[in-house]
């Protein structure tokens, strides 16, 4: 009789342990599924603007084609300045699509002594001959070797060019990739730049504060500068080798 009771109790304990283990496994599995689902939802919000295999979705400013000086190299788009420039030809490139409120994520790598920039709010209308005439710029620069870095911190890498200086210098050395995330949200009147994981710049996108910044900059008398809420994203030719990759955007 005692042996029978022992067997029954042992069976109950084993069954209980298995049931408990099953419940824990089920909970962990459910958590994992929820975690994966959350990650997937986040990824679905992003649109890839450049996947490293083609220039689809981009064109030369004021043109229907990509300038030949932009090449596909090691899953990056790389600009090689021409030895002889064609008069009045623009080598900057812009997106086919226009954007209003967004988070833009990309990586850039600059050559020694190099200069470039990332624009938004570009108007490609006939009266505007260059992207920078309308589009504000986040600076891409070799801070150590380019002379523009000596013209004030608002000209250094990560700056809202000629208006807001980065709070710290977190740029990586020449030849290394820098990760830049730019937020422009007109609904909340907020903009910011995160460079290599550090928030280095914040700014308003319109209104009295914005107007005051423009008034103190080189763009003060530029009709149309920063005036377009909706516009194209652009990458600048500044006559130096520069590379961009992993470009994606999340519309807000």
Image (cartoon, helix red, strand yellow):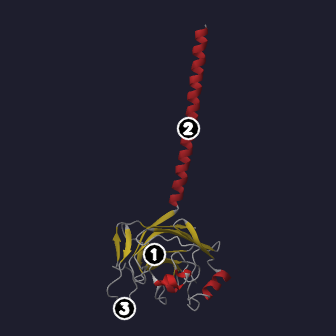
Q: For the view shown, which residue lies furthest in the left direction?
A: 83
Residue that numbered label 1 is attached to: 95
How far separated are the C-alphas under marks 3 and 2? Answer: 68 Å
Residue appearing at x 58%, y 34% in the figure: 23
The image shows residue 139 at horizontal and vertical percentages of 50, 78
For the residues bearing labels 2 and 1, Cβ distance under 8 angstroms? no
N-terminal label among 2 and 1 = 2
Residue that numbered label 3 is attached to: 87
How far separated are the C-alphas under marks 3 and 1? Answer: 23 Å
How far separated are the C-alphas under marks 2 and 1? Answer: 46 Å
Residue closer to the observer: 64 or 170: 170
Looking at the figure, which quarter contains the C terminus?
A: bottom right
Image vertical order of residue 81 relative to residue 7, above or below: below
The image shows residue 244 at horizontal and vertical percentages of 42, 71
Image vertical order of residue 39 relative to residue 154, above or below: above
Residue that numbered label 2 is attached to: 26
Look at the numbered disc 3 and give the secondary structure of its residue. loop
**Picture quarter containing residue 87?**
bottom left
The mark found on residue 42 in the picture is none
Describe residue 216's horizontal placement relative to residue 132 as left or right. Answer: right
The image shows residue 162 at horizontal and vertical percentages of 56, 83
Look at the numbered disc 1 and give the secondary structure of its residue. strand
């Amino acid at each position: 009789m005692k042996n029978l009771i022992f067997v029954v109790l042992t069976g109950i304990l084993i069954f209980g342990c298995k049931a408990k283990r099953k419940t824990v496994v089920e909970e962990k599995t459910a958590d994992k599924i929820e975690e994966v689902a959350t990650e997937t939802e986040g990824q679905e919000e992003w649109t890839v603007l450049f996947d490293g295999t083609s220039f689809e979705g981009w064109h030369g400013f004021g043109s229907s084609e990509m300038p030949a000086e932009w090449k596909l190299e090691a899953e990056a788009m790389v600009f090689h300045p021409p030895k002889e420039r064609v008069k009045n030809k623009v080598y900057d490139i812009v997106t086919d699509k226009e954007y209003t409120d967004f988070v833009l994520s990309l990586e850039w790598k600059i050559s020694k002594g190099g200069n470039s920039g990332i624009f938004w709010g570009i108007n490609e209308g006939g009266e505007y001959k260059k992207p920078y005439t309308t589009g504000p710029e986040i600076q891409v620069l070799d801070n150590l070797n380019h002379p523009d870095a000596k013209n004030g911190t608002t000209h250094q890498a990560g700056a809202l060019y000629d208006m807001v200086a980065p709070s710290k210098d977190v740029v990586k050395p020449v030849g290394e990739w820098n990760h830049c995330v730019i937020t422009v949200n007109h609904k909340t009147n907020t903009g910011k730049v995160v460079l290599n994981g550090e928030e280095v710049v914040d700014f308003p996108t319109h209104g009295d504060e914005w107007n005051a910044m423009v008034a103190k900059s080189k763009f003060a008398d530029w009709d149309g500068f920063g005036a377009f809420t909706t516009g194209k994203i652009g990458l600048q030719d500044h006559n130096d080798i520069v590379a961009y990759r992993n470009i994606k955007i999340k519309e807000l």
